[in-house]
Image (spheres, rainbow, N blue to C red):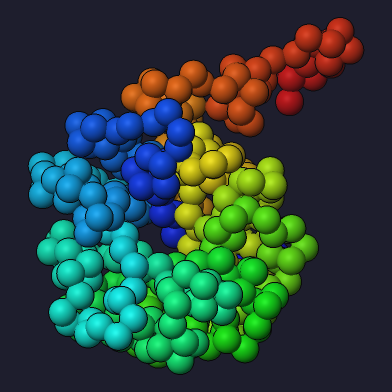
Amino acid sequence: MPGGTQRRVELLDTTLREGAQMRGISFSVEDKMKIARLLDNIGVSLIEAGNPGSNPKDMEFFERASSLRLDNASLAAFGSTRRAGACAGEDANLASLVKSGAGTVALVGKCWDYHVREVLQTTNEENIRMIYDSVRYLSTCGRRVIFDAEHFFDGYTADRGFATECLEAACSAGAAVLCLCDTNGGAFPSHVARVTGDIVSRFAPRAVVGIHCHNDGGMAVANTIVAFEAGADHIQVTANGYGERCGNADLCAVIPNIQLKAGCTCIPPAMLPRLTDVSRQISEIANIPHNDTSPYVGGNAFSHKAGMHIDGMEKARA
């Protein structure tokens, strides 16, 4: 495993954006303020607070953010690259990211040529320019840019050269983090590990490599861990695995696995015992029943029913 006990991981929690897209969840601005404080209380590095360019509620959150007085976390705003054929300096979405006041911006861009053709309906060359211009504009405005490489694992499989060129454009324009996104949650751990290792070897230390996993195949936590093992030092998660469709990599499983089993720091060790309480409080705010079978923080996590397990625990609790 890369690193060792001295290795540190930057943790970005996107509960306020990705988590808010989960069916049945509708956070008010006040809800988001409460969750931000809870995440700050366990030492999360970055809180992705929303997309100010597409959601008035998110812009209101950023306007009120100065009253949060966070001790450990910084806020990040989320948005997308400029429109095809437009000028970055005149793009309303990019302007809203700067206006939000967030020092960090997570900027999503297409990295799968299929989506460039079918969704953006533009050329690969223009997509590369969109990425470069947008990252460059935000960097020039003094923002730290995390480039979220959308559908990266599919794109890398379809056209490795183009997907890598998208990352190169972001890196050359000043992106601090290149975050590889398994946007549809369809990648296998073996593929994620291999591709992440390839990208780390190509771009580190020019940029930090990150990972963002969805759980459509039930492998978001596993994919996050193997990416970490392959050298990803920026990890994106949500509390309780909340997120669109089947959810995202669960902060409450990722943190203990990396911290307790891999010996790597992502939150201050003294704050780890708070994780269960924070998990439960966020589920109450979301009005979602807390999952008793959740690893580490679920009510069943350290309970036993089988006689031989109970006997073992009574004899050797360690």
In the picture as drawn, the residue positioned furthest to the right comes out as 308
Is 32 drawn above or below residue 176 in the view shown? Answer: above
Q: Nearer the viewer, residue 157 or 304?
A: 157
For the N terminus, give its image quadrant.
bottom right
123 or 17: nearer the viewer? 123
Task: Looking at the picture, tell me which residue is in the foreground, 40 or 223.
Answer: 223
Q: Residue at x 20, y 32 (%)?
A: 30
Q: Residue at x 61, y 79 (%)?
A: 199
Q: What is the count of numbered marks? A: 0
Quarter of the figure with the C terminus: top right
User: Residue 89 placed where, x, y %?
Assistant: 17, 82
Question: How far across and down, in percent of the image, does residue 133 sit?
Answer: 30, 86
Taking depth in this image into account, of 242 and 237 the one nearest to the observer is 242
Residue 279 left/right relative to 161:
left
Task: Please indicate, yes or no, whether residue 123 appears anywhere in the rendered image.
Answer: yes
Residue 15, position as x, y percentages in the image = 40, 42
Residue 73: in sight, yes or no?
no
Rendered residue at 41%/54% (across/down): 12
The answer to whether residue 215 is left or right of residue 92 is: right
59 w.r.t. 315: above or below: below
Where is 304 relative to 243, above or below?
above
Q: Residue at x 54, y 41 (%)?
A: 245
**Where residue 79 appears, x then y in whole percent?**
31, 63
